[in-house]
Image (cartoon, rainbow, N blue to C red):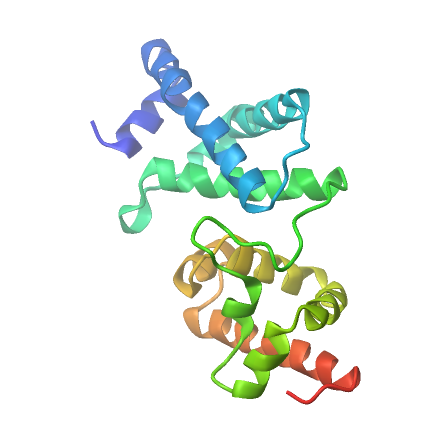
Amino acid sequence: MDDLEFIQRCISRDEHSWDQFVDRYSRLIYNYIHSVLKLKGISHLNPENINDLFQEIFFSLVKDDFKKLRSYKARNGCSFASWLRQVVINSSIDYLRRNNVVMASLDAEDDEGLKIKDILMDDKASVREILADKDMFEHLKECIEDLDTDDKYFLELYVNQAMDLKELKNILKISRGAADMRRIRIINRLKDCFRAKGFVC
C-alpha cells in the first residue's frame, strides 16, 4: 500500500489504519520537533511545551474533517514523511515565534557546520571578509531584523532549514524564477543595509 492510499484510509476513518498512523507517525513528529529545536539552538524548552506543540501539530492534521491531512496528494513522488516534516517545521517555527522563544545566534552551526555566512555570501571577496568578521554578524542580525515578515520567513527556510529553491517554490507557491529573484532581492537588501551602516560590500 502506498502512502496516498494509506492516508486516504485514515481520512475515511478506517480504525486499523488510524491506529497504524498514530503508532507510525507520533514518534516521527517528536523527532522532527526535536530536530527543529536542535537546529535553532534551543535547549531550554521544557517537555510540557514540547508536548503542547506535538498536540497542536497532531490536532492540526485532523481538525475540520482532516482538512490538512487531505491536502497531502503525493505530488512529484513526495513521501508522506517528507510532507509531514514540512508541516512540523512550519508549525514549530510558528509556535516558537508566538511564544517568543529566543533562537540561536546567527553564527551558530547546524549538524553539517553550515553557517548563515556560508549561505548569504556571494563570490565577491569583500562579502566573505565582511561576513567572516564576528562584529559584522551583529550588524547582519540588525539588518535581518529590518526585513519584512515574508523575507524573514524566506530566509528562515532557506538558511536555518537549508531548503533549496525547488522546495521553497513549492512551499511558497511561487515559480522557481520568483524564488531565485526573492533570494537575490533579500541578499541585495542586506548589502544595502550594510552599506548604510558604512561598510563596503
Q: Residue furthest bottom?
A: 200
Residue under the image location 49 percent in, 64 percent down: 174
37 to 174, vertically: above or below: above
Is the N terminus in the top left, top right, bottom left or bottom right quadrant? top left
- Which residue is more in the foreground, 179 or 118? 118
Q: Nearer the viewer, residue 53 or 112?
A: 112
Query: Where, by quadrant of the figure, is residue 186 drawn?
Result: bottom right
Q: Where does residue 61 sit, x and y in percent of width and height?
A: 51, 29
Q: Is residue 71 visible?
A: no
Q: Residue at x 45, y 48 (%)?
A: 111
Front residue of this view, candidates 14 and 133: 133
The quarter of the image holding the C terminus is: bottom right
Name above or below for residue 200 compared with residue 156.
below
- Residue in view at x 59 percent, y 76 percent: 187
For this orientation, the residue located farthest to the top is 15
- Tell me if residue 74 comes above or below residue 153 in the rendering: above
Measuring from the top left, give residue 188's x and y in whole percent: 62, 81
Rendered image quadrant of residue 18: top left
Confirm whether residue 18 shows in the render. yes
At x 65%, y 49%, the residue is: 104
Q: Does residue 83 appear to the left or right of 108 in the view shown?
A: left
Please identify the residue farthest to the left as the structure is shown: 1
Q: How many marks?
A: 0
Above or below residue 109? Residue 185 is: below
| Residue 38 screen position, x and y as percent | 55, 40
